Amino acid sequence: MPRLRLFAHLREAAGTAVVDVDGATVGAVLESATSTFGPDFEAGLAASRVWVNGDPADETTAVASGDEIAVLPPVSGGQQASVTDFQVPWAAVVVVALAGLLFLDPAFFVAGAVGALAAWALDLSQANTEDPVGLPAVLVSIIAGVLAPAVFLDGNHLEGVGLAVAIGVVATFAQAAFWPRARSLVSLGSTMIVSVVAAAAAASLSIVRLADGGTSALWVLLAVCLVSSLAAAGSERVPGHDRLDPLSAGAIGAELAGLVVSYFQGLAVVPYLLVSMVLALALIAGRAMGSLVRTGKVLLVDSSPGLLTPLDGPVLGAALLLYALVLFL
């Protein structure tokens, strides 16, 4: 039987990435798959493109046992995907920019991190118009994340992170008191989650950058985020032979990046592999968190609305960086 390979939300609708389906033509295979996987799968097929063994095809294309039919939905913005399409995630642009700031004074990196977090918060606040994330509370949380750790410069830095998170919680409730739209349970919960994560991320990045040896740890974080996002995007965009799904590809890419960077930075490889594992899990959890805030649904494969959606995972990874370093080093 021909093999049907599915991507993005078609894979989520079917519950599998690869399935063998009987049929003599592409149309017959897709019709059989539709009857098996239901209306959500059928709706996803409407705007999708089809390839057989790497070549463009249509419903009349004949297929035989051993042929692979790859079905890809359109990419963001309505543009149709093709075999050669590869779009670098916005996360890669931000990560490269922050990496460049590591060569400058620490204040420049902290300022860049604050700007990236603020842009991410703005993007999140515009994604869900019915139950919006309260931007003022998140911005207060980001500022608190940078300033609060200074109170504990001679003590436990995690206490500074805790103070920043507490300020974010207070800011969320204070905003709800003055902004009626922020009082719904969904909006309040979304703002609380984003404020806590943003505060922890800002505090974590600031503390690590200012600490002795912190630059090396940030190189690991940035490499993990960059390689993971590129590996996930690459596995998603190019149809062909059997390969890992984007989540698995991203996780493996994160581990390899952590291994390589820690080795060349002269760091303890095994502890930083554990740190990279925490960051890889954070990238997946952050994607789920972002999709839940943006759409009300958990989407691990399909894209959520927003220009800076690829930053959802890296922001959560940044929030957990300091904790991971304290735990394993």
Image (spheres, grey):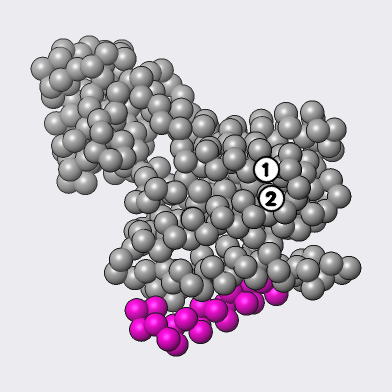
Q: Nearer the viewer, residue 326 or 220?
A: 220
Q: Report the residue marked by disc 1.
A: 101
Residue drawn at the location 51% of the way across and 48% of the way down: 311
Stretch in magenta: 163-184
Is 182 inside the magenta-drawn segment? yes
Distance from Cα at disc 1 to Cα at disc 2: 6 Å
What amino acid type should be assigned to the residue bearing mark 2? Phe
Q: Residue furthest left?
A: 60
Q: Nearer the viewer, residue 327 or 139?
A: 139
Residue drawn at the location 45% of the way across and 56% of the way down: 290
Q: Is residue 86 left or right of residue 50?
A: right
What amino acid type should be assigned to the residue bearing mark 1? Leu
Quadrant of the rendering where the N terminus is positioned: top left
Q: Indicate the secondary structure of the residue bearing disc 2.
A: helix
Q: Position of residue 256 (x, y in %)?
A: 66, 30
Q: Report the residue marked by disc 2.
A: 108
Residue drawn at the location 36% of the way across and 61% of the way down: 126
Is 113 inside the magenta-drawn segment? no
Q: Is residue 305 left or right of residue 284?
A: left
Q: Position of residue 257 (x, y in %)?
A: 66, 32
Q: Is residue 37 left or right of residue 115?
A: left
- Say whether marks 1 and 2 touch (CB < 8 Å): yes
When asked about the image quadrant of residue 294, the answer is bottom left
- Which badge, 1 or 2, comes first in the chain's sequence? 1
